[in-house]
Image (cartoon, helix red, strand yellow):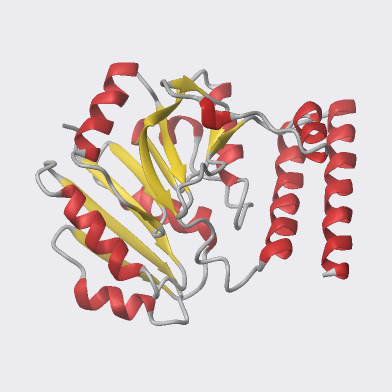
């Protein structure tokens, strides 16, 4: 089995961080060599102090004096990771099945994947929007009309445009080839932008629905951005992605649709 560098960025995760560490540690037993690097983004709820008291062997805490954001925090860890296989993992991901890491490693090798994502579901068992297509006029229009592609129906390894970095497995050489996560994105859409670069480099980005994990989804962001306001932040990040990777008339259409979505969210905020 490949040696693993598992990278985790935390921010105000005290309510669930002990469960996260315990489950991750149990899942890694018998998997060979690994390291778990945790960057705490200046949590104000005592997350870092909790971590410093109970981290198991193989786990290492790095304290940041400021909130670096998701991208910069992960980049810091990527630079320090010592193994070739890199896993980005959110601290609100749980319920690893038996032999998860060994089976995931074998699937990556079998399919020749450069980037791998797994099925994520909500705590109630429902499918989470963990994979998708790149932003496009067709996708934006479908979203406005409430018509989304049914990714939950996928049941075999499938090439996808993008997955969320709550769980992503790749390798160091790819970061060295296409670059680290774009730090212009403080939160949201950085996964879309990075996956776009991976596709432009003709890398194989695969979704493995046979592996399923529970993702609380935005748990550490909830205390900062609630509901509709969090949605507004996502659309702002999407706008940044569009300006980086679209041009001409297509960009104009996408920007107009993005602005429309933001206006609609603001109206809903005012009415709530």
Q: Could you tell me if residue 198 is visible in this image?
A: no
Residue 98 screen position, x and y as percent: 20, 41
Identify the residue shown where x is 39% and y is 75%: 14
Residue 173 screen position, x and y as percent: 36, 31
Q: For residue 37, which quarter of the picture?
A: bottom left
Q: Could you tell me if residue 36 is visible in this image?
A: yes
Q: For residue 104, which quarter of the picture?
A: top left
179 vs 111, left or right, is: right
Identify the residue shown where x is 64% and y is 29%: 133
175 vs 217, left or right, is: left
Asked if 156 appears above or below 30 in the picture, the reply is above
> Nearest the camera: 80 or 151?
151
Q: Report the quarter where the N terminus lies.
A: top left
11 vs 261, left or right, is: left
Identify the residue shown where x is 41% and y is 30%: 209
> Nearest the camera: 13 or 88?
13
- How many numbered discs? 0
29 vs 162, left or right, is: left
Asked if 267 appears above or below 207 in the picture, the reply is below
Residue 231 screen position, x and y as percent: 71, 56
Q: Report the quarter where the C terminus lies.
A: bottom right
Residue 228 screen position, x and y as percent: 73, 62
Asked if 11 appears above or below 183 in the picture, the reply is below
Identify the residue shown where x is 17% and y is 54%: 26
């Amino acid at each position: 089995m490949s040696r693993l560098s598992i990278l985790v960025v935390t921010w105000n995760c005290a309510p669930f961080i002990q469960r996260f560490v315990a489950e991750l540690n149990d899942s890694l037993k018998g998997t060979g060599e690994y390291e778990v690097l945790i960057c705490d983004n200046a949590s104000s709820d005592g997350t870092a102090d909790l971590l410093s008291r109970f981290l198991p062997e193989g786990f290492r805490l790095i304290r940041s004096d400021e909130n670096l954001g998701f991208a910069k925090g992960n980049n810091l860890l990527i630079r320090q990771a010592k193994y070739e296989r890199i896993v980005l993992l959110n601290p609100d991901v749980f319920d690893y099945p038996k032999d998860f890491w060994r089976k995931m490693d074998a699937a990556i090798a079998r399919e020749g994947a450069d980037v791998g994502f797994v099925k994520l579901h909500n705590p109630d068992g429902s499918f989470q929007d963990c994979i998708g297509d790149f932003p496009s006029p067709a996708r934006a229009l479908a979203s406005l009309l409430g018509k989304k592609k049914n990714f939950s129906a996928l049941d075999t390894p499938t090439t996808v445009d993008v997955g969320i970095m709550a769980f992503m497995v790749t390798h160091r050489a790819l970061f060295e080839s296409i670059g680290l996560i774009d730090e212009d994105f403080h939160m949201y859409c950085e996964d879309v932008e990075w996956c776009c670069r991976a596709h432009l480099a003709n890398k194989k980005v695969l979704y493995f629905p046979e592996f399923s994990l529970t993702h609380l989804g935005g748990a550490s962001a909830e205390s900062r951005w609630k509901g509709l306001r969090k949605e507004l932040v996502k659309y702002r990040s999407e706008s940044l992605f569009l300006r980086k990777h679209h041009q001409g008339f297509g960009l104009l259409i996408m920007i107009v649709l993005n602005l429309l979505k933001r206006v609609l969210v603001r109206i809903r905020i005012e009415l709530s």
